[in-house]
Amino acid sequence: NAGVTQTPKFQVLKTGQSMTLQCAQDMNHNSMYWYRQDPGMGLRLIYYSASEGTTDKGEVPNGYNVSRLNKREFSLRLESAAPSQTSVYFCASRGALDNQPQHFGDGTRLSIL
Amino acid sequence: GESVGLHLPTLSVQEGDNSIINCAYSNSASDYFIWYKQESGKGPQFIIDIRSNMDKRQGQRVTVLLNKTVKHLSLQIAATQPGDSAVYFCAERIGGYQKVTFGTGTKLQVIP
């Protein structure tokens, strides 16, 4: 039982390049989330998907797009990477019941030069 | 805006002692609270949660206390071990909503 799996684990991009971060969960969870984590700022929500077929903006959506490919997979795309998007990106998923915690992957460390 | 925060950025405790990590929240509408542990290079790991209709919940070596009067949440770790060294986050959520607000974290250092 892998839980939430993110690929790749590390990536270096040049400014202007595009990149898709992959996330898959095997817990049959309805909801999936993308966060970024920057030093001293805690986790900030980029986008989320409450259920298959729906996506919504979070706190910091600018410069990102998402796709809920199916119930298992939720991808995050940077169309034109900027140095300000250097961060650690975490994917999370959550079950359908109201008071359930999110379960996180181990992150993608992304550096943009 | 309203946010979740932590009182101490770093906490050092002796191995075997009890640890207490504090969290203040300001959104009175929040009714579900979660503590996460994050080890270096890893994602946040769920530790324990509590609903607002409770004031205490216990797990294995961990206890969460909720004081709604002063909007305060704490995580107590009994007999702290070196493996407990990590950053601990509290988080709050308003019932029925997808969004969770995370604090910035407290680093727990266990001294052998």
Image (spheres, coloured by chain):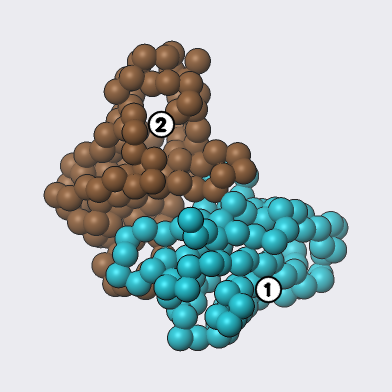
Chain colours: A brown, B cyan
Amino acid under disc 2: Pro
Give the residue displayed 37% in from the left and 58% down from the top.
B99
Q: Is residue A29 left or right of residue B68?
A: left
Which disc, if any, is residue B76?
Answer: 1
User: Considering the numbered disc 1 on the image, is that residue within a helix, a strand or a loop?
Assistant: strand
Q: Quadrant of the image for the N terminus of chain A? A: bottom left
Task: Decide which of B51, B40 is in the foreground and name it.
Answer: B51
Residue A102 is drawn in which quadrant?
A: bottom left
Counting other residues with Cα less than 10 Å from the Cα at mark 1, is it few (<14), some (14-19), or many (20 or more)?
A: some
Which disc, if any, is residue A8?
Answer: 2
Q: Chain of mark 1?
A: B
Residue A108 is drawn in which quadrant?
A: top left
- Give x and y (percent) for residue B67: 59, 81
- Give x and y (percent) for residue A93: 34, 55
Q: Is residue A21 left or right of residue B45?
A: left
Give the residue displayed 59% in from the left and 52% down from the top.
B104
Give the residue displayed 55% in from the left and 38% down from the top.
A38
Q: Is residue B80 visible?
A: yes
